Amino acid sequence: GAGVSQSPSNKVTEKGKDVELRCDPISGHTALYWYRQRLGQGLEFLIYFQGNSAPDKSGLPSDRFSAERTGESVSTLTIQRTQQEDSAVYLCASSLNSGSWETQYFGPGTRLLVL
Amino acid sequence: GDSVTQMEGPVTLSEEAFLTINCTYTATGYPSLFWYVQYPGEGLQLLLKATKADDKGSNKGFEATYRKETTSFHLEKGSVQVSDSAVYFCALSGQGAQKLVFGQGTRLTINP
């Protein structure tokens, strides 16, 4: 079956512009996660959705970052007034249910470059 | 907070060599432990996992045992192949939590 998909695969933007990153989870997966990986660093958690609510937003680095999810479907991560330090690969993952033992399935990522 | 420390790379081995990539963690309670792998040009995928102490996860000839007493989850393979060249990430999900906490990743290169 189809895996997690993300769009766009690459995005180049100018400092100060807003960007929207999209994630389509695996059908039927109730939990959805966003992570980012900056060059030379590990993956950092950003936010987690269960259904369309976000019980854990603790990883969002500033109020320029926001995310929403429609039901148990598509999620959008929005970065307002982008800064050069926002350049990273943004990864989305989904899991069938929430729980520390659940396997998270990752998408291919969106590579964001802020000039 | 929870954290994962894994062996820094890059690691270069010859085909058929024995592989160990060390991973230790800090967490309260009983986390679940994972190894994810990213092959060149591909996305991150689960390699194996263990969800309670003394469990052994295994897949594709790789193994890792959840050691509570040493807070470790070292990845091993008896005989590596060129196709095992990839970046390997150790991760944990804390008891009662959903997010994954990742180590820095270890780049492994296997030469023929």
Image (cartoon, helix red, strand yellow):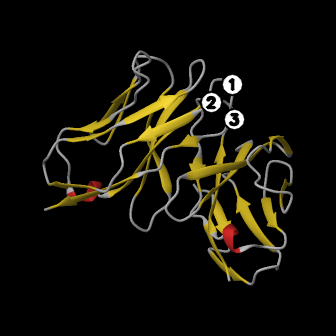
Q: Quadrant of the N terminus of chain A?
A: bottom right
Find out whether the residues at labels 1 and 2 contact each other: C-beta distance under 8 Å.
yes
Mark 1 crowdedness (10 Å alpha carbons): few <14, some 14-19, many ≥20: some
The amino acid type found where label 1 is placed reads Gly
Residue beneath the point at 69% across and 68% down: A86
The amino acid type found where label 2 is placed reads Ser
Identify the mark at residue B96; answer none if there is no mark: 1
Circle 2 SS class:
loop
Figure disc tally: 3
Residue beneath the point at 71% across and 61% down: A23
A32 to the left or right of B15: right
Q: CA distance from mark 1 to mark 2?
A: 6 Å
Residue under numbered circle 3: A97
Q: Chain of mark 2?
A: A
- Residue A35 position in % (x across, y down): 65, 53
Find out whether the residues at labels 3 and 1 contact each other: C-beta distance under 8 Å.
no
Residue under numbered circle 2: A100
* B70, above or below B91, in the image: above
Q: CA distance from mark 3 to mark 2?
A: 10 Å
Mark 2 crowdedness (10 Å alpha carbons): few <14, some 14-19, many ≥20: many
Which quarter of the figure has residue A104?
Answer: top right
Q: Chain of mark 1?
A: B
